[in-house]
Amino acid sequence: MAKSKKGDVRKNSAGQRKHDIREQEFDFRFYATEFEKLLEKEYKILLDNGKVVTLSFNKGNFYHLLGFHKFENVVFYGMIYDETTEYTPQNFFDDVYAGNIWYSGYDRNKIAIPKKFQKSTFANSFKEHELTAKTRHTLEHRFPFFSYDEVIQIFENKEVVKFDNGESDYNVRATKILFHLISEKNRNLNIFIDEDDGENCFVTSFYLESQKNIYKRRKDGTQMDKFRVLCLYIEEKQNHQPVKFSADWVATREFVAKGCETYNRIRRLMKKGAICTNSLKSNLTDIIKRKDEILLEIERLENEETILNLENIYSIASESNKDEYALKLMDYDIDIEFILTDQKDLKRKMNKNKQEIKTKKKLVKTLEEKAEEITSALPEIEELDKKVLEQIYLPLIENSEFWKEEFWDYFIHNFDYLREIITPKQLRNEYKKWRECT
């Protein structure tokens, strides 16, 4: 085993041996299997500035992303960075994935170590490495937190930090930071990304921060700027089949509807955040249906009111006049033998009936006002719909900015995109079908 560096304290103040993190087991093959799930996919993260962060992974990323390059005294480090050898990070991934390299060793029948390294001071396994600040960081802040699901959770977060290296206390190669809070640690698991020319992005690092939010703050303590994530779209590289499409329709509508009082008023009226043409049309249908139901109830109550008035008059009429009101009651199929004669009970029922009619008429008026407001707002909401759809789909579909404007009118009236997932690929297919029919 390689000797520890001076800074590697093995005993505490009481002289007792401290736990050596190198004695833990780390399942390299699990990491490679999880990383393999990330391959052959393209990850598109749409930001509220209209830009798309497009990422993908290749086998060569595995070595650096998980921090294997921090183990500078392990023989594989020497092989990869020695220009005279042909061993690459891609070879390293393939060997880990195949089970030829593990934490405590490697398969000597499958991997040939060049002669120049056979008698060197390089350690033959990661478990034998020196425990330095770099390697401890990888063992504690990278290996335990890597999985496919964790990476996807980071991509699904609703915010992206706009990282300014010059304004940070931490020198990290990144222009943007994607993150996800690990609740049990109360710290963020970060993916750092950089870009070559403003469009081609790549992952530079991945690890759990040492203190909460340290990369979100500038040197003066103020918060770094952030982007709002409007959509995450993942598709297969080869056949472009969708893997995941998650659009934040509410946030997107808020973004495009800034200053639109009609939308704000309608949203408050409906008490919903996800308002669109189809949802309003559905609400309008429900309101009209409910109003018609209440009008029928009012008709029934008014009929009941007439009967109660006749019963009241019959109960107090003189004997000579009772026959006249008895006949009128018979017109309503009321048997006079079962008529209430107690004036208090009759008055109570009449007052209750009158109040119900009043309440329901008031509700009808409210529903009519809602229906009128929705009807008048629909044209403006339709225009907002188009802007929302264009905000989400145009950056994710090649050449869609040249689509005919009429298609959006067709789409918003025939598809409920808030309730059903319609991926960019599906929308492109719908556009082709629509063009064939027009």
Image (tube, rainbow, N blue to C red):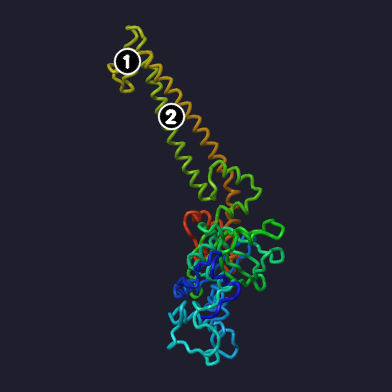
Element under label 2?
helix
Residue 205 placed where, x, y %? 59, 70
Which percent across, then down, holds residue 435? 53, 65
Q: Is residue 337 above or below residue 391?
A: above
Q: Residue furthest toward the left?
A: 337
Q: Which of 126/273 is in front? A: 126
Residue 326 circle label: 1
Give the residue drawn at x 61%, y 69%. 193
Position of 44 compared to 339: left or right? right
Mark 2 surroundings within 10 Å by alpha-carbon count, few (fewer than 14), some (14 through 19), many (20 or more): many
Q: Which residue is mark 2?
A: 298
Q: Secondary structure at mark 1?
A: helix
Give the spatial CA distance, label 1 vs label 2. Answer: 25 Å
Percent x, y of residue 69: 57, 77
In which quarter of the view is residue 400 placed? bottom right
Please, is residue 296 above or below residue 397 in the view?
above
Which of these two is toward me, 348 or 214?
214
Is 268 in front, or is 86?
86
- Give, as a three-letter code, the residue at label 2: Ile
> In front of the other: label 1 or label 2?
2
Q: Is residue 100 visible?
A: yes
Q: Residue at x 49, y 61 (%)?
A: 422
Q: Is residue 113 above or below residue 307?
A: below
Q: Quadrant of residue 334?
A: top left
Asked whether residue 430 appears in the rendered view, the answer is: no
Residue 162 locus on image (x, y percent): 65, 62
Disc with the residue nearer the chain's start (1 vs 2): 2
The quadrant holding residue 346 is: top left
Disc 1 marks which amino acid?
Ala
Circles 1 and 2, Cβ within 8 Å, touching? The answer is no
